[in-house]
Amino acid sequence: MLSIFDLATLLLTLSAVFGWINVRWLRLPHTIGLLLIGLGSSLVLLAAERILPHFEVTSSLQAAVGQIDFHETIMNGLLAFLLFAGALHVDFNKMKDQKWAITFMATAGVVISTLVIGVGLWLVAGLIGVPVPLPWALVFGALISPTDPVAVMSLLKTVDVPESLKVRIAGESLFNDGVAVVAFSLLVAVAVAAGTPDPADLSLWHIAELFLYEGGGGVLFGYLCGFVAVRLMASIDDHVVEVLISLAVCALTYAISLRLHISGPIAVVVAGLLIGNRGARMAMSERVRAYVFAFWEVVDEVLNSVLFLLIGLEVLVLSFDLSHAWLMLVAIPIVLAGRLVSVGSPLLFRPVRNSFAPGVIPVMTWGGLRGGVSVALALSLPASDYKDEVLAATYAVVIFTIVVQGLTVKYVIRRWFAPELL
């Protein structure tokens, strides 16, 4: 049994070694390179175990990775710091210009995508002989609909896009997690209850009330925490203490949000936006601002590295049935179709339609990456007859979006936005 320190040491060491290999030879975007090397290493080790049943390296690494609770590590650990770091670097003034588009895509867009993907998977899965009940198909739709902020923010660092589009993509990815987690929780409750003699009664009013409480509560609490942090920072001029304040506010905001049953992801994003914008202008000297932003940039890169490595290594402890292969393949175009419909739906509304330039929809559709959040939610599902199917489809979509879409989105951007970027 490895200690937490041993596990952290293992992950950091592998991240450093694999990162060096990527920079030295592969020269892929850092996080994608780590995921591919981690995934490739996992597959090689699993193949070696089949050939040499007593191959101790595979079993030792499986035991170590098996000790890591992926859901807890992401949802109650890394996510808070990654969301805060991402929000800290977003220009709120530019985001305000895209407020209607971001709000629609992060709320109604998630609901639309959940319905399209859920119904699509339910219909197609039945046709290919791997039936998935509608409630569980909708659960898959909810957990796979939000674009992963970690994957998206990492992607935006490697490609050149018009600033307005970059802000829209970043803003959507930062806020839609909170909405998706609430929808996921509700749909899991419905799916579990559907298999019992006495199904739970979840009215539309109750669902709306939960969304308002968790989402609205997250916004208000995040603003309160960010406001207090800005006031504290404004009263001093010490880069070490102000970095500590930002770190404490991030962790404390998320931890208390979970206790209050409000959206932790939304709360830390709001706090990060406030500190990164109002705090940077009014409460930090130029020297302090440089230290704070540099610190969170390092935190972002290190945790990104660990997260993408974990996604690749998780294959060691997951068991996929060959009968799920077709389901994994059809899930990819279904999710892309759901993304296209959700991104294109704002065109039906005049206030939002005017902000959509030609090329925005294809770029946002192909650039809608999924990542650790979707995998973490899938792994958190209660034991059921359909958990394996949902997990297999989730993993297939996540790997495809990060590797295939992540490596090719620059060509889509070049196709639509080359004139503006030159």
Image: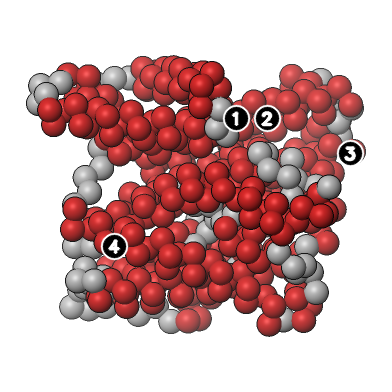
The residue tagged 1 is 301
Proximity of marks 1 and 2: CB atoms separated by less than 8 Å: yes
Position of residue 106 measured from the top left corner of the image (x, y, whole percent): 62, 64
Quick one: SS at disc 4? helix
Q: Position of residue 288 (x, y in %)?
A: 83, 24
Identity of the amino acid at label 3? Arg
Dot placed on the residue nearer the N-terminal end, 3 or 1: 3
Q: Are marks 1 and 4 in contact (CB under 8 Å)?
A: no
Q: Are marks 3 and 2 in contact (CB under 8 Å)?
A: no
Measuring 36% from the left and 35% from the top, which residue is drawn there? Answer: 39
Dot in front, 3 or 1: 1
* Number of the front mark, 1 or 4: 4
Image disc number at residue 327 = 4
Is 315 placed left or right of 203 in the picture? Answer: left
**How many labels sit on residues?**
4
Categorize mark 1 by other alpha carbons within 10 Å: few (<14), some (14-19), many (20+). Answer: some
Left or right: residue 195 compared with residue 142: left
Residue closer to the observer: 303 or 207: 303
The reply to whether residue 399 is in sight is yes
Counting residues from the start of the chain, the first of labels 4 and 3 encountered is 3
Q: CA distance from mark 3 to mark 2?
A: 18 Å
Residue under label 2, please give it. 297
Q: In this rendering, is residue 60 above or below 352? A: above
Work out how far the residue at label 4 is from the one at label 2, CA to CA, in angstroms: 38 Å
Q: Is residue 77 left or right of residue 121?
A: right
Mark 2: few, some, or many residues within 10 Å (few <14, many ≥20)? Answer: some
Report the amino acid beneath label 2.
Answer: Glu
